[in-house]
Each structure stands twice: as structure tokens, then as C-alpha cells.
Amino acid sequence: MHEHVISEQIIQKALMYNNVKAITVEVGDLASPPIEDLKEHLSAIISWDLIVKSKKATINCDCGFKGEPNIRQKNHTNVIYNCPECEALLPEILDGDKIILTNVEVE
């Protein structure tokens, strides 16, 4: 159900343009729902061409590590991740936690 709400928000933003032909959506590794679920749901409810891209996440941990997190669990409503260096849970997210409509192609 979570992907339905997000899909509707993406569609509403795209419809701000006339004659939509295609959209590109960027899904961060730490975003929820998972990229496959969002892509499947969007594909089922739009007739436009759809490109869904993954965006790597970046975290900043108190131990000094800055880079990609270790994703331990991901489902429709949350993501559990930790620092791959010290294994601290849920360090600060710098990037890769959002779902963004990055491009709208019109006819």
C-alpha cells in the first residue's frame, strides 16, 4: 500500500506537464518501498514509458566512516542499516534515502 501513495504523488507531479510521454524516477537504496515494488506498481497504473534508477546511499558514522551502508533489512515501510566499519545501527544518512521524480518527457 505504501507504494500506492508514493506512486500517486509521482503521477501528480508528472501531470503538472502536458502530454507526458515518459518519466524517470530515482529510488535511493535507503528509500522505502523497495525499488522493484515501486517499479511494478507504477508500471501497472501508468501508460507512459518508465525508467527507474537506483541511487546508492551514503552515510556518515560517528566512528569516522563515510560511504555506503550495510543494508540489513528492507521492506515496504522501513530500512534497517548499519555502519560496515563499526556496525553501529542507523548512522546519519547523507544521501540515498529519497524517491525523486527526476525527469518528465513530454510529446
Image (cartoon, rainbow, N blue to C red):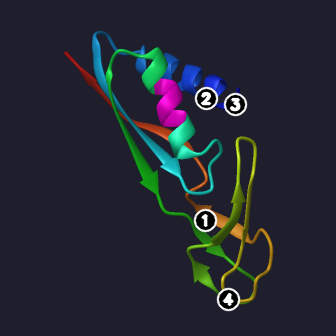
Residue highlighted by disc 1 = 94
Residue wearing tag 3 = 2
Q: What stretch is highlighted in magenta?
A: 38-42
Q: Is mark 2 in CB contact (under 8 Å) with mark 3?
A: yes
Across and down, in percent, residue 13 comes to 48, 22
- Percent position (x, y) of residue 64? 67, 89
Foreground mark, 3 or 1? 3
Q: Is mark 1 on a helix, strand or loop?
A: strand
**Mark found first going from the N terminus, 4 or 1:** 4
Q: Quadrant of residue 95?
A: bottom right
Looking at the image, which residue is at 62% across and 56% down?
A: 30
Q: Which residue is drawn at 66% across and 83% down?
A: 84
Number of numbered callouts drawn: 4
Identity of the residue furthest to the right in this view: 89
Query: For mark 2, does the 10 Å Cα neighbourhood hold few (<14), some (14 to 19), or many (20 or more) residues?
Result: some
Q: Which amino acid does label 1 sit on?
A: Leu
Report, in whole angstroms, how far the alpha carbon at label 4 lies from the one at label 3: 32 Å
Rounded to the nearest angstrom, the CA distance separating label 1 from label 2 is 21 Å
On the image, numbered disc 2 is attached to which residue? Answer: 6
- Label 3 sits on what residue type? His
Q: Where, by quadrant of the figure, is residue 103 drawn?
A: top left
Q: Is residue 18 above or below residue 73?
A: above
Mark-to-mark CA distance, 4 and 2: 33 Å
Mark closer to the chain start, 3 or 1 = 3
Crowd tier of the residue under label 3, counting other residues whose Cα lies within 10 Å: few below 14, some 14–19, many 20 or above:
few
Distance CA(mark 3)–CA(mark 1): 23 Å
Please, what secondary structure does the residue beneath circle 4 have?
Answer: loop
What is the distance, in whole Å, between disc 2 and disc 3 at their CAs? Answer: 7 Å
